[in-house]
C-alpha cells in the first residue's frame, strides 16, 4: 500500500464533488487530499483508520475528515472474497473551504461551521441518531444540480455544527502537508490488516518497510502516534469486537482467531482498548 496524495483530474478547478459509490470494497490505499470529505456509509462495515484512530465502522456512519488528514477504510474480510457478492454503498462529499465563495465561513453567522471545519483536522464521527435523521437528504444529494448540491451541503455542515453528539477521532493533528509521501507506511498498514491473525514480529514488519527495527520504530511512531505493538493490538481487538457482534464463536476461540496466544492477555488488551471485557461487550449488545 502507498500513502497517496489524491488530486484527480476530475476534481481540478472544482470546489465540490459529490458521488455515490456502489463498489465491492472501499479505499485500497492510506491516503489524504487537500479537500474536506464528508463520508456517509449506507452499506459497508470494517475497520476505519483516521489519523492515529483505529475503529470499527458500520452502516449509518457519518464522518467528516479534514484536509490533508490521512485516512483509510478497510472492509471486513468477506468483502474481499473472490466470487463474493457483498457491495459497499457510500455517499462521498468532497469540498474546498471556499465552495460557497472565498471567506464565506469567516463571517460571524458561520462561526460554528468554521469551528467544525477546524475540528475536522482530527476527524469527526457523528452519532448514529444524527446520521439517521439526515439519511434521506444525504441519499438524495447526488440527484441534485450542482447549485442545489452546494446549498444542501452548506445545510448539512450547519446542522452538524449544531450537534453535540460527535466524537473526535484522531488524538493529535496528523495532517500531512508534504508531497513526499511515505510509501512504506501504506505497505505496513496493509500487511498488518491482512495478517493480524498471525504472529508478526517487529523484525517481520521492519522487513516489510525495508528498514532496520530501530529506524522502523521511530518512523512508525512519528507517522501513527502509536508503537507497532499498540497498533497491532488495536487491529486485533477491533476485529475481535466485530466477531463478538457478528459471530457465535466462543470468546476463547475469538482470542486465537485474532492472533492472541493467551486468553488473559486477550482479555487485558480488549479491556484496555474497549473499556470493558469481551464478555461484557458481547452481552450488552
Image: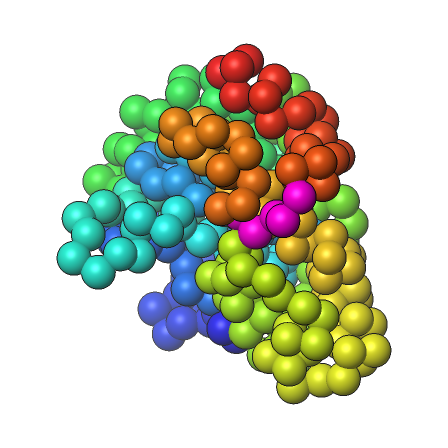
Q: Residue 203: x and y, percent? A: 70, 76
Q: Nearer the viewer, residue 137 or 221?
A: 221
Q: Residue 27: x and y, percent? A: 41, 59
Q: Residue 158: x and y, percent? A: 55, 29
For the magenta stretch, what is the residue range? 258-262
- Dominant secondary-structure state across the stretch colored magenta: loop
Residue at (31, 37) in percent of width and height: 43
Would you say 69 lies left or right of 2 here?
Answer: right
Residue 36 in view: no
Q: Residue 257: x and y, percent? A: 49, 46
Residue at (41, 18) in percent of width and height: 133
Q: Nearer the viewer, residue 251 or 133?
A: 251
Q: Is residue 156 magenta?
A: no
| Placement of 159 over or under 114, stated as above or below | above
Would you say 270 lies left or right of 235 here?
Answer: right
Residue 231 sits in quarter: bottom right
Residue at (47, 52) in percent of width and height: 73
Q: Residue furthest top?
A: 284
Amino acid at each position: 500500500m502507498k500513502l497517496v496524495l489524491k488530486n484527480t483530474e476530475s476534481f481540478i478547478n472544482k470546489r465540490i464533488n459529490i458521488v455515490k459509490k456502489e463498489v465491492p470494497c472501499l479505499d485500497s490505499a492510506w491516503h489524504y487530499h487537500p479537500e474536506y470529505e464528508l463520508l456517509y456509509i449506507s452499506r459497508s462495515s470494517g475497520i476505519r483508520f483516521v489519523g492515529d484512530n483505529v475503529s470499527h465502522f458500520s452502516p449509518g456512519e457519518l464522518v467528516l475528515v479534514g484536509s490533508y488528514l490521512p485516512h483509510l477504510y478497510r472492509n471486513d474480510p468477506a468483502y474481499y472474497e473472490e466470487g463474493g457478492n457483498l457491495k459497499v454503498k457510500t455517499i462521498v462529499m468532497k469540498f474546498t473551504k471556499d465552495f460557497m465563495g472565498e471567506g464565506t465561513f469567516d463571517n460571524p453567522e458561520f462561526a460554528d461551521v468554521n469551528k467544525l471545519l477546524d475540528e475536522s483536522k482530527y476527524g469527526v464521527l457523528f452519532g448514529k441518531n444524527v446520521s439517521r435523521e439526515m439519511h434521506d437528504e444525504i441519499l438524495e444529494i447526488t440527484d441534485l444540480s450542482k447549485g442545489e448540491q452546494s446549498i444542501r451541503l452548506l445545510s448539512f455542515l450547519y446542522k452538524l455544527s449544531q450537534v453535540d453528539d460527535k466524537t473526535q477521532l484522531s488524538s493529535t493533528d496528523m495532517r500531512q502537508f508534504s508531497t513526499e509521501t511515505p510509501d512504506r507506511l501504506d505497505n505496513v498498514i496493509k500487511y498488518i490488516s491482512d495478517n493480524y491473525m498471525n504472529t508478526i514480529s517487529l523484525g517481520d514488519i521492519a522487513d516489510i518497510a525495508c528498514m532496520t527495527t530501530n529506524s522502523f520504530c521511530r518512523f512508525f511512531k512519528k507517522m501513527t502516534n502509536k508503537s507497532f505493538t499498540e497498533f497491532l493490538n488495536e487491529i486485533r481487538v477491533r476485529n475481535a469486537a466485530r466477531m463478538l457482534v457478528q459471530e457465535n464463536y466462543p470468546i476463547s476461540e475469538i482470542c486465537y482467531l485474532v492472533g492472541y496466544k493467551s486468553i488473559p492477555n486477550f482479555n487485558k488488551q480488549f479491556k484496555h482498548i474497549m473499556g470493558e471485557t469481551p464478555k461484557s461487550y458481547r452481552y450488552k449488545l
